[in-house]
Structures are given as C-alpha cells and as structure tokens.
Amino acid sequence: MSDAARPVALVAREHADERRVAATPDSVGALQRLGLEVRVQRGAGAAAGYADDAYAAAGAVLVDGADDLGPDPSAALVLRVGPPTPDEAAALPRGATLVGLLAPHRNADAVRALAAAGVTALAMELVPRISRAQAMDALSSQANLAGYRSVLVAAARVDKYFPLLMSAAGTLRPAEVVVLGAGVAGLQAIATARRLGAVVHVSDVREAAREEVASLGGRFIDLPQAVDQADAGGYAKEQGEELLVRQREVLTERLARAHVAITTAQIPLRPAPLLITRPMVEAMPHGAVVVDLASADGGNCELTEPDREVVHAGVTVIPGQGLVQSMAGEASTLYARNVAALVGLLVADGAVRVDDGDEVVAGALLTRDGEVVSPRARGALGLPEVAS
C-alpha cells in the first residue's frame, strides 16, 4: 500500500501538565504494520525522553500542526494520553477517530465538544476488563506504576526506617503500612512495601482479594460485611454510608499505628469514595505519610488537595495523580502498547473501521455520530439513557 493510500495516525503533543506520550518510537513500528502512516507532532515525546529524531528514525513523519491529518481526515486517527480541551475537540475534523484517556466524568465540556464535532472517541478507561482486552488495559498498566511509585515516595518522606533493623545501638521495628484497596495499584504497593521490609496491612471490601493479599505477604484487615462487594468487572462496588462508617471505625484503629497509608480505591467514572477522614489522619503517628492515588477523582482522604501536599497534625498527605508522570518514559512505553493493541481492532483492509459489533470496541466507545454513546459516561454526565 502506498503512503498516499494509508490512513493517518497522528500522535498529538500533550498539554504541559502531561509528560506521557501516546506512541513511542518502538510502538511506531507496530502502528505502521497495521497499515497506518504515523505522524508525530514535533516535541510530542520530549517530556517522556523520546526525541523527534528517534521518531523519524522509526519511520514517523514529524509535523507541526494538530490538524495535519492528511488528505482523508475521515479516516484519521488521533492518539492522545490526556483529553483535549473543548476548543481542541471542536477543531478535530468531522469523522476523525480519537483514542485516549479521556476521563469523561471530569471533562464534560470536552466530551460534548467531541460529540458536536462528529468525532468518534474511544476512551481507554472504558475498555472492558475481559481476557482478550488485557493488552489494552491502560488503567491497569498505569496503576501498576502508580502503586510502585507511591511506596517509594512514602518511604522517602516518612519519618521511619522501613525494614526491621537490629544493631549494636538497638532494634528498630519495621514500618507499618496500610494499603486501602487491593486492585492493581494496591497489589503493587503491597509487593513493593514488603520488598522494602515493611509490615503491610490491607483493606478491601472484596473478600476475593484476601488470597491475593496473603500471597504477597500482606495481612488482610477484616471489615464489616466485606463480602461480595465487587461488580461484574471485578471493581469494588460503591457502598452505602452506614457500611463505610463501620469500616472507618476498624480502619481508625489500624491507622493509629500506621506510619504510611496508601489509598487506591477508585470507581470508574465516579468520585472516589472517602475512606480516611480528618479524625483518622489526626489519629496517625506524628511524621506519618498518606499517599492518595485517587486524588484526581476527589481523593480517598478528606484532607487531600489535588495539586499540593497538605501537612495536618504532623501527617503529610500527598496527592498521587502525578506519580505516573514521574516515570513518564516507562509509563509511555506501557501506554503506547495499550493504544497500539486497541488500534489493531480499528484498522482493517487499509481503512479505519470502528466496529461496534466488537465487544471491546463497543465498550470503549464514548462518542459517535454526534452523540455520547457510552451508557456509563452518559450516567456520569447526567444524560438520559439512550432509547434502545
């Protein structure tokens, strides 16, 4: 197929607060093998450590403008990490297909602009968690890194030696770490904290998480009614306030002895559940650290501020949404592979074809034909259900 006949995949330059990139020089080859011409905005990978020359050497075409989608914009793919602004969404060509972590519940205006512009948008966070979609699961790939990094940040900031220390000067007991939520991020946090020598206690409302926690050396915290609190996709269900209150009472006792708390509880397209209240923070030892990986969605800790650290009663509360950015190169490598795997379902016979008969594609679809089509996103945006 000649380059002129190839549909274009444009790798967009992200906003200044997003260091990751949607394609790496390594993933350019995978996209080209799908029959795509890959164009990369100049500087798109710079913050992640990928120079323009590396993209050019991989066969990508370097471009300046976001609208350089080639002669057939209806067949164009735009690959991003973060969501576009409403103005950027409105400027996309009608018929273009956008792929990215679009966070529709936090970017309602951009989602409406995508729909109004006639853009077909696929949100990586809406990819269903089924076996054949594991290679496309960007939430998991990024959460894994966040869980790892959260422990390293906490270990560097807490006023406590992590492992057991026995010396001529005496013995130091190991740090006590509490991990709230045993999903992908939580399990990686458990594993990392254990490798550093900490004693790790873990809370999760899904009873099925108990065995995974034990396999990593964590100690499961028994909570009231922590049975079958998982939905069909394996995520924790949103719980009633009465149950949360009883669980907080148990957690307060554990946190009163904890030097570090890592919170990871998130519900897709919903505000994060409140797990650690102000009194619970005040019960923690002086010098303790809370790292809140749910800070972008409001946080699991009452004191979390999304853009700054808070010190309260001698406890430092650190927002965690930027932790993956601190590993932008590795995070981009994983995310780019997730994107390339999903794009593989969108290209057939030399054209971009968004087949909603495919359950993965249908699950990831956010906007199409001028409408917000995802039931989950419509619910998050307060839109009525689409008549069947």
Image (cartoon, rainbow, N blue to C red):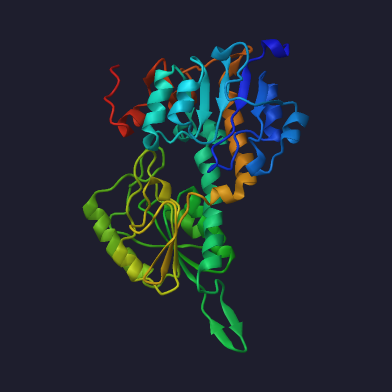
What residue sits 63% from the left and 15% below the top? 70
Q: Which of the 4 image quadrants contains residue 304?
A: bottom left
Q: Position of residue 167 (x, y in %)?
A: 62, 85
Residue occupying the far left of the picture: 242
What residue sits 49% from the left and 21% below the top? 91
Against 370, residue 316 (above or below) is below
Residue occupying the far right of the picture: 57
For the residue pair 102 and 31, the one nearer the viewer reads as 102
What residue sits 52% from the left and 18% below the top? 96
Q: Position of residue 103 (x, y in %)?
A: 43, 36
For the residue pair 181 and 117, the one nearer the viewer reads as 117
Q: Tell me, yes or no, if residue 216 can be seen here.
A: no
Q: Which of the 4 image quadrants contains residue 349?
A: top right
Q: Position of residue 294 (x, y in %)?
A: 42, 50
In the picture, measured across the screen, residue 294 lies left or right of residue 332, that is left
Q: Tell me, yes or no, if residue 326 can be seen here.
A: yes
In the picture, measured across the screen, residue 129 lies left or right of residue 297, that is right
Q: Which corner quadrant holds the C terminus?
A: top left
In the picture, measured across the screen, residue 226 lies left or right of residue 286, that is left
Against 292, residue 356 (above or below) is above
Against 320, residue 357 (above or below) is above
For the residue pair 169 and 92, the one nearer the viewer reads as 92
What residue sits 57% from the left and 21% below the top? 67
Q: Position of residue 8 (x, y in %)?
A: 63, 19
